[in-house]
Each structure stands twice: as structure tokens, then as C-alpha cells.
Image (spheres, rainbow, N blue to C red):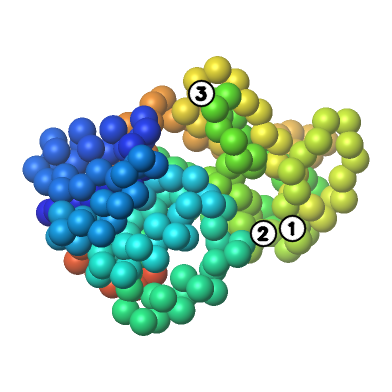
Amino acid sequence: MKIALIGYGKMGKMIEQIARERGHEIVSIIDIDNQEDFESEAFASADVAIEFTAPQAAYGNFLKCFAKGVKVVSGSTGWKKDHQADVERLIGEGNTLFWASNFSVGVAVFSAVNRYLAKIMNGFPQYDAHMEETHHIHKIDAPSGTAITLAEGILENLDRKTSWIKGEENKPYDPQTLRIDSLRRGEVPGIHTVRYDSEADCITITHDAHSRKGFALGAVLAAEYTKEHQGLLTIEDMFNF
């Protein structure tokens, strides 16, 4: 498979390594200093572009890919607020986007467990739910895209929570909101914890990433899946959850 990389930071370099190990060809690498390569024949030859950039750049990158008939796998977060409807329209015109806030296989399993647990806990109102996510100090967005996706999975299944809110220390919050506490520490790849707390006990589930390698492998697996499929694709589609 021919792959283009958009964004060549730590994640992009790891994706490149894993893609080559799996026998794929990297035909184009685009970063901030060579944006003109979107117009190159090499980029247009790609079966799939894997895009990990900043939220403000993601949607524009989608447009450039679609203009060349290149399918996209994206792990960029933050674009949905302003461009969800635009992307859905573009998908309706025959373009393909595989989007996930987190490509880790473990996180995909954790997300499925999270939704199922929320469905069970819907019948036990004595438990209050809240979340915590910890990442490295270089991560700008808070809560993380993964935390927001997990929160949405809870809100879909837990009637007593109607929205999520970013936690602030020593600040009271509406019990109908799901609080997400965001911590930034060292070089932590990512830890996500969901807690259901009552006077009697606490039920906790946690995903603790050991490195970025799981995210990079998942992105390459998503590219392999995307090459053979069409439309707006998700982790749930790929793993049939």
C-alpha cells in the first residue's frame, strides 16, 4: 500500500517505521515546511494519507487530500466542533475519512468496556461518575480527545449525566455533569480512568499506555482497513464492536 504522512513529529516518525515494517511504501511526507507537496504526483499516488497535526490544520488537510482523491486516516482532534457538517457533506460526495481520537487497540477495547459499564451503572444511581486523564506536558488540548470520546460513551448510556465539563480544583459542579480532570506530567503517553464512586465503594477502570507505539500501530491498521472501505469510518467499524 502507498501511504502519505501528514505531520512528521514523534507520532509521524513512529507511524513511518511501523508502516515500513509491515511492507508499505511511504510515497510522501508533508510537514509545516513543505505544504506545496500536496500538489505533487507522489502525494496523489497515495492510497491513504495518515494525518496527525494540529486541530486548526486538520480540516484544511482533509480538503487537500480529497481534492487529490486520497483517502484519509486522521488522529487530529478539535476540528469536529466547526466542521462536522462539512465533513459529512464531503463524505456524501464520495470521499473517505477514518477518524479516531485514539488508535490504540487497547483503547478501543477500553472504550467498549466503558460503554458497557455505563449501561450497567445506569441502574445504580448511588454511584457518581467522573473521569481523569493524564498526559505529557507537551499536550495542549485538555481534556484530551480520547477523554471526550470516552465521556460521550458514558453520556449515551448514563441517564443521570447530561453533559461533560472540564474539572477545576475546589470548584463545585452540577451532579448532572460528568467532570473530567486533566493532569499534565512528565512524558506520560496517556492514562485514562473512569470512576463510579458511592458511599460504600468505588468501581474503577483504567487504560495506561506504556508508549506511543500502540497508537502508531493502530493508525497503520486503520490505513490498511481504509484502503478497502468507503465513507466515514471509525475504530468500532474496524474492530466490529
Q: CA distance from mark 3 to mark 2?
A: 27 Å
Give above or below for 20 relative to 240: above
Name which residue lies at 27% across and 38% down.
15
Q: Can residue 193 be seen in the rendering of this structure?
A: no
The percent coordinates of residue 165 (x first, y second) are 75, 48
Which callout, 3 or 2, points at the residue further toward the start of the chain? 2
Q: Are dots 2 and 1 in contact, CB under 8 Å? A: yes
- Callout 2 amino acid: Leu
- Callout 3 amino acid: Val
How busy is the neighbourhood of tag 2: few (under 14 within 10 Å), some, or many (20 plus)? many
Q: Secondary structure at mark 2?
A: helix
- Callout 1 amino acid: Ser
Q: Secondary structure at mark 1?
A: strand
Q: CA distance from mark 2 to mark 1?
A: 7 Å
Numbered tag placed on residue 188 in the rendering: 3
Which callout, 3 or 1, points at the residue further toward the start of the chain? 1
How busy is the neighbourhood of tag 1: few (under 14 within 10 Å), some, or many (20 plus)? some
Q: Can residue 140 be seen in the rendering of this structure?
A: yes
Q: Which residue is mark 2?
A: 155
Numbered tag placed on residue 163 in the rendering: 1
Name which residue lies at 88% across and 31% down.
170
